[in-house]
């Protein structure tokens, strides 16, 4: 008799060996509980905590999860009428809050450095007929990478993540103030800001940064540096480049891990773009990316010498022909991809002039005001582009998948990037959307991205995000709404 992981076609000899190794580690290290986690639409881990004796069954037969978890907007309200007839026609496999099955990846097993005796594994959802759930955002990225591989390329990504850390002054959960969503704790700052890269502020924030460091390194993440950003209580974490899927996994693990570890240490970490305080500085997530030639593993964006007849304002002066086409595709679909890279109402407040954030669809050579920054020079193996459109709470699987699909369209249609800008906040260039609603309209109208992601996924994403917009429109106190919706939970 076959078990569920075999029916799904993922259980081979290497996985069987990995399962045995996990069970042995649990026994040898006296692990008391194992969290099985899955990344939702909004980039947040959800899951269940298993006792050690239940882990083997979960590895082989899967772990039940209510399907409505995949249909929720940011407040955790389900955006579909799951108990009304017709949902199964709109979303095959879903209906009546039925079960999906999570299959853990034994290769992802690790012991959480902040939770004694607690193991952790990443999982992905399957329908009970052993078919993969296409709405799963990690599968969305896996599909995009498979499309890119058919063209002979992979993608490497490096992460620069800005976020805020606050000291918790009062973390009590007052039942008299309970609401949906719940309120965040009362907080104070860990540094006063407005002194970029100040060593004094770094020392002042050392306790909190130490928690971040120990958490990231304890999880095996390739943390490169921790830095003081310009805004009050704002910091930045920089990671070495890895393959795209690993980078996305790392981003989710980092965000959720540091929030948990810092909370235990008396701090509140927020990846909300603009926390709800006066004089706050917006946080961005800058995604460095380079194409990889799958034949030899080389950086496919590097060129040996500038293309004939070009100047530094031409993309092919620095980037390979393929790299320039990828860049052009990222620019061409920027208004539509904005909803995937900046998926909250709050995040669009970042697109302001002279704020080290993009406002228009432009690229520049080492220009931090442009949407895309081209870095490197001829012969430089580190040549890459940096997209500065993202907010730190974005789902990393969707953010990176958007780069791939946009770049692929640039390659296939031989798009041109146009000249580099030296004045990113002036001129008549196409503007980025200024609201989440405008970005969703652009995404739904972009037939290339709808086809690439699949119409069912885009329709579901847009519907869930519009439910969020609708609640915001009805809120009497917009600031309080964002404080509970984003600052409390992201």
Image (cartoon, rainbow, N blue to C red):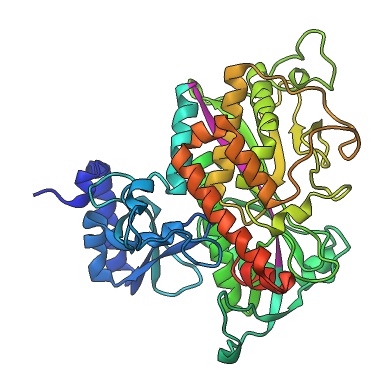
Magenta-tinted stretch: 151-164
* Residue at 56%, 29% in the rendered image: 448
Location of residue 65 by image quarter: bottom left
> Which residue ends up furthest to the left in the rendered image?
1
38 over 145 or under it: above or below: below
192 over 225 or under it: above or below: below
Q: Is residue 162 magenta?
A: yes
Location of residue 52 by image quarter: bottom left
Which of these two is toward me, 65 or 251? 65
Q: Position of residue 37 (x, y in %)?
A: 41, 61
Asked whether, in this view, residue 169 is left or right of residue 24, the answer is right
* Residue at 45%, 46% in the rendered image: 138
Location of residue 207 by image quarter: bottom right
Q: Is residue 86 visible?
A: yes
128 over 241 or under it: above or below: below
Q: Position of residue 264 (x, y in %)?
A: 56, 78
Q: Position of residue 206 (x, y in %)?
A: 72, 70
* Residue at 24%, 44% in the rendered image: 8
Q: Is residue 105 visible?
A: no
Q: Main secondary structure of the magenta part?
A: strand
Asked whether, in this view, residue 57 is left or right of residue 326, the answer is left
Which of these two is toward me, 251 or 94? 94
Which of these two is toward me, 95 or 278? 95
């Amino acid at each position: 008799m076959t078990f569920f992981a075999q029916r799904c076609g993922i259980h081979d000899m290497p996985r069987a060996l990995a399962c045995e190794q996990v069970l042995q580690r649990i026994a040898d290290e006296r692990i008391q509980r194992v969290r099985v986690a899955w990344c939702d639409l909004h980039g947040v881990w959800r899951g269940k905590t298993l006792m050690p004796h239940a882990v083997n069954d979960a590895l082989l037969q899967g772990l039940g999860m209510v399907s409505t978890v995949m249909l929720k907007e940011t407040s955790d309200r389900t955006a579909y009428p799951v108990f009304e007839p017709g949902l199964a026609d709109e979303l095959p496999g879903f209906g009546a809050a039925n079960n999906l099955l999570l299959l853990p990846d034994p290769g992802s097993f690790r012991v959480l450095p902040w939770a004694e005796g607690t193991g952790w594994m990443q999982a992905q959802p399957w329908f009970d007929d052993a078919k993969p759930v296409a709405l799963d955002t990690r599968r969305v990225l896996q599909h995009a990478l498979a499309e890119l591989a058919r063209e002979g390329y992979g993608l490497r990504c490096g992460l620069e993540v800005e976020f805020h850390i606050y000291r918790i002054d009062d973390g009590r959960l007052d039942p008299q103030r309970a609401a949906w969503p719940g309120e965040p704790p009362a907080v104070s700052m860990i540094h006063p800001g407005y002194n970029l890269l100040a060593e004094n502020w770094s020392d002042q924030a050392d306790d909190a940064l130490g928690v971040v460091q120990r958490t990231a390194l304890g999880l095996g993440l390739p943390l490169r540096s921790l830095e003081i950003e310009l805004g009050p209580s704002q910091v930045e974490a920089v990671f070495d480049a890895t393959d795209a899927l690993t980078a996305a996994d790392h981003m989710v693990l980092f965000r959720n891990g540091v929030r948990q570890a810092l909370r235990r240490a008396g701090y509140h970490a927020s990846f909300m773009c603009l926390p709800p305080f006066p004089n706050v500085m917006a946080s961005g997530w800058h995604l460095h990316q380079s194409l990889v030639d799958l034949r030899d593993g080389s950086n496919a964006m590097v060129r040996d010498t500038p293309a004939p007849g070009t100047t530094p304002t031409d993309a092919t002066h620095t980037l390979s022909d393929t790299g320039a086409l990828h860049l052009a595709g990222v620019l061409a679909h920027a208004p539509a991809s904005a909803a995937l890279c900046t998926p909250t109402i709050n995040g669009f407040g970042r697109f302001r002039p002279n704020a080290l954030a993009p406002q228009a669809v432009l690229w520049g050579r080492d220009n931090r005001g442009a949407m895309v920054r081209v870095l490197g020079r001829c012969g430089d193996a580190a040549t890459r582009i940096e997209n500065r459109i993202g907010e730190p709470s974005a789902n990393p699987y969707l953010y990176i998948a958007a780069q791939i699909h946009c770049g692929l369209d640039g390659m296939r249609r031989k798009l041109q990037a146009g000249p580099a800008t030296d004045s990113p906040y002036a001129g008549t260039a196409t503007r980025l959307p200024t609201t989440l609603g405008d970005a969703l309209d652009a995404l739904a109208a972009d037939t290339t991205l709808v086809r690439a992601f699949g119409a069912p996924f885009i329709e579901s994403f847009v519907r869930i995000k519009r439910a969020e917009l609708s609640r915001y429109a009805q809120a009497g106190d917009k600031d309080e709404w964002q404080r509970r919706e984003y600052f409390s939970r992201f």
